Amino acid sequence: MVKSLSVRTILLVFSAMLLLPASCKKEDDTYQVNSELILPASAFKTKLKTDQQYVAILHANLFQQALSANELYDIAQCIESIGDKEVAREVVISNFMNKPGVQIPTDSAMHADIDKFIVETYERFLVREPSEAEITYFKNFILSDPNVTPELVYFSFALSNEYLFY
Amino acid sequence: MDRRKFLNNTAKIAAGTIIAPYILPSGRLFAQTGSQLAEHVVYVLFAGGVRQQESVLQRYLDDSQGLPYGGNIMYNTFSGAAPTQKIVYGTGAGGPNPIPAILSQTLEAQGTVFKEVSSSTAGHYGGLNALLQGNTANTQGLKSKPVYPTIFEYLRKHGGFPASKIWFVGNGIGNSVPLLNYSNYAGYGPQYGANFFAPTFTFGDDGVDYLSNAKVYHPEDQLSPMYQMKYFLDNSFKSVGNSLPLLNNTEEEKQEIKLFIKEMFDKTSAGTIDFPPVADNGDLQTIGYACELMKWFKPALTVVNMSNVDGCHSDFTGYLKNLHRADHGLGHIWDCIQSIPEMAGNTIMIAMPECGRNLEPNSIKDANQWYAYDHSDTNARRVFGVMVGPGVPVGLQLGSEQTPIGLTTDGVPTIAEILGGPALKNQVLGSGFLAPGSESWFDRV
């Protein structure tokens, strides 16, 4: 009897505590400022690039020159022939990286001014400036891992989801 | 609440918490394995509009050109004497040398033949959709994804098969073939789709130019940090636009696919792809790569598409040649399956055309002055089906022109039953997406 009473008491107290936050309502403190949904700049890239658009832009970003129409058509067909498009893009990028003429900063140039490298990479691939959080992340990542080269940074940008949209 | 009840409830909640992460997306706790009829299925979409008359009915020129020369030109598939005159379907100039049979015993003798199957459509894309989604939707357009879930999605979503175990090997990228690896149906879609290759493109001249020279990165030292940076970028990206159609291969599966691509370029360059003995058309080259794919991935489901026979629109002689070669390819696939230890004796192969061809010819004559055939009449809705493998009745023939048995939409529930047992078959049949009357072939026999 005593045991069941004590359990009931605990349950009552616990229920009362659950109701407490609902019982008082916080006053609206927006002070006549309209509430707006704030999204990052990248959120407005809503259109998915076609395979041809992707390849054309990728080639321009890596080689700083346009791809011929024939090559563009052929590479887009290669991508179409592979079901997993992520794999297809990865293979295309790694083929480009193996070709002469890729315009990538040297490792020492990257380390000489990491902030500048990050900003330029964002502008080159994602056509926007990075946020402070993004700069900090990449700066820490580059400094913490000696294996990270400009080529790998470029690879990750070319493979990112944001790069697939415009 | 007494102590016993409290402990009982706590134990139930703890058990639920532990089990919940292992429940499959379909709500099933475990993937179907115990009741499988076989662990592998090879489904051959054969081969671009095949007339009953020259295939299962073995009439050769007798029912098409008004020439009294019958005979069987599908040596590996059907039992029956070959034509003795007017041989044009073989190799050499004019095709006088038939390609010898690969199999010592025909597929007909080893399994079950559905001699008269009804195709729901006389068109290629509709026919391929019927074979893969078990339905021919009136709203299905060309150049658009299947409107109903495909067998690939049923297997991955409800059967729990990983992406790298479900493959579709296309014979090209034309005619919307690359679109067939998953549907647009809500709740299904790319995350349950099949992996796809069109090998004659991927590993052909363009592939050699643009895919074969991929830089090899170290998986831990280079690829790992690269992916970490990519994932950071992906997490920072909050698009309000379209979502990405991803097949959800795991990183390990993607790595396997990349290694396979590299291996294929090496083998192509070395001339060691497992092509059929004669590989002088796109279908046979596709089959060679499909065999390599089976050896590498040992897929649960491999779908192979062929279409060279469709040259019959303007070249009947070419049609006979390609039909003879499609049979040669089918024999090679079955032979290849027996050479893979994990698949031999554990694989069921199904072959069925997506549509037939007309009873009456069009007005086009080829070099032999033989008429060509399109596909648009009721004869074009007559096809055959062959099934062979463990558990398949041997030497059984079902149906005739007067009593057709089976639909082209039967392929979907049949594969579901083979790989997922009665539970998956019933789930697929009960989905409401299949054409009325569709059944597993095991129920029809």
Image (spheres, coloured by chain):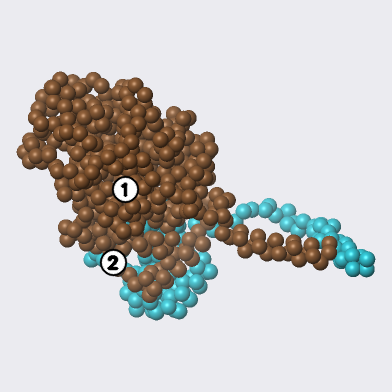
Indicate the position of residue B340 as horizontal and vertical percent values: 29, 57
For disc 2, the marked residue is B215
Residue occupying image coordinates x 33% and y 36%: B396
Q: Chain A, which colour? A: cyan
Q: Is residue A124 left or right of residue B319?
A: right
Residue occupying image coordinates x 18% and y 20%: B363
**Are callouts 2 and 1 both on one chain?**
yes
Indicate the position of residue B31 as horizontal and vertical percent values: 50, 54
Neighbours of disc 1 within 10 Å: few (<14), some (14-19), many (20+): many
* Element marked by disc 2: loop
Q: Chain of mark 2?
A: B
Task: State the separation of the CA atoms marked 2 and 1.
Answer: 25 Å
Q: Is residue A41 left or right of residue B76?
A: right
Which callout, 2 or 1, points to the residue nearer the camera?
1
Residue occupying image coordinates x 30% and y 26%: B380
Observer-nearest of B46 and A106 = B46
For disc 1, the marked residue is B169
Whether residue B95 appears in this view of the structure is yes
Q: Amino acid at mark 1?
A: Val
- Does B53 appear above or below A100? above
The chain drawn in brown is B
Observer-nearest of A149 and A117 = A149
Quadrant (top left, top right, bottom left, bottom right) of the N terminus of chain B: bottom right
Residue occupying image coordinates x 42% and y 66%: B227
